[in-house]
Image: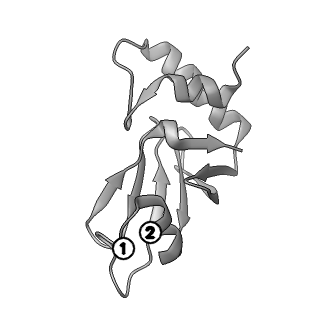
Amino acid sequence: MKTLSQKFQSLVQGSQFVVGTQQVERELIMSEIINNNKESLSISIEGVVIKLNANWSISRKSVNYYSDLTKKEYIAITGSELGLKKNKTPYISIQMDGRVEIFGGGNHRQSISNSSIIIL
């Protein structure tokens, strides 16, 4: 039987769920991840372990996970300094629909493949 993390990763391709995956199944997997990680979510990406805090809406109907990154972590994950701003703090965000994005502190953002993320 696949772990929850393996189920999630098997349904994603790039930064989007695989076309044809039923919405109900995607929602079920994401709701399981959210139910098991109400306050924070720990992940490993490109060998970097990150603890993301849950950022709930006021109604508590939606959530995303967020964490600041060091410049060293940003470079390790993205493989370059592209988009990294000198006086800004880079961060990572995982949205409720499974999108994973890294921001270099400015308007530049990079989508990260969900299949490269391990939920700890």
Q: Quadrant of the N terminus?
A: top right
> Which mark's residue is nearer the viewer, 2 or 1?
2
Q: Quick one: label 1, few (<14), some, or many (20+) residues within 10 Å?
A: some
Q: How many marks?
A: 2
**Residue 42, image x and y in percent?**
68, 51
Name which of mark 2 and mark 1 comes first in the sequence. 2
Q: Residue at the spot x=43%, y=16% of the render?
A: 23
Disc 2 and disc 1: Cα gap in Å?
13 Å
Q: Is residue 81 above or below residue 109?
A: below
Q: Residue at the spot x=53%, y=58% of the render?
A: 66
Q: Residue at the spot x=55%, y=54% of the render?
A: 46
- Disc 2 target residue: 75
**Residue 15, image x and y in percent?**
38, 38
- Disc 1 target residue: 105
Front residue of 59/71: it is: 71
Name the quadrant containing residue 13. top left
Which SS class for mark 2?
Answer: helix
Which mark is drawn over residue 70? none
Q: Quick one: label 2, few (<14), some, or many (20+) residues within 10 Å?
A: some
**Residue 68, image x and y in percent?**
53, 69
Front residue of 49/76: it is: 76
Q: Is residue 11 above or below residue 105?
A: above
Left or right: 79 as drawn, with respect to 70:
left
Q: Is residue 96 above or below residue 13?
A: below
Answer yes or no: do the residues labelled 2 and 1 have beta carbons within 8 Å? Answer: no
Q: Residue furthest left?
A: 107
Which SS class for mark 1?
Answer: loop
Going by the numbered disc 1, the residue's amino acid type is: Gly
Q: Quadrant of the C terminus?
A: top right
Question: Which color scheme is applied?
Answer: one colour
Going by the numbered disc 2, the residue's amino acid type is: Ile
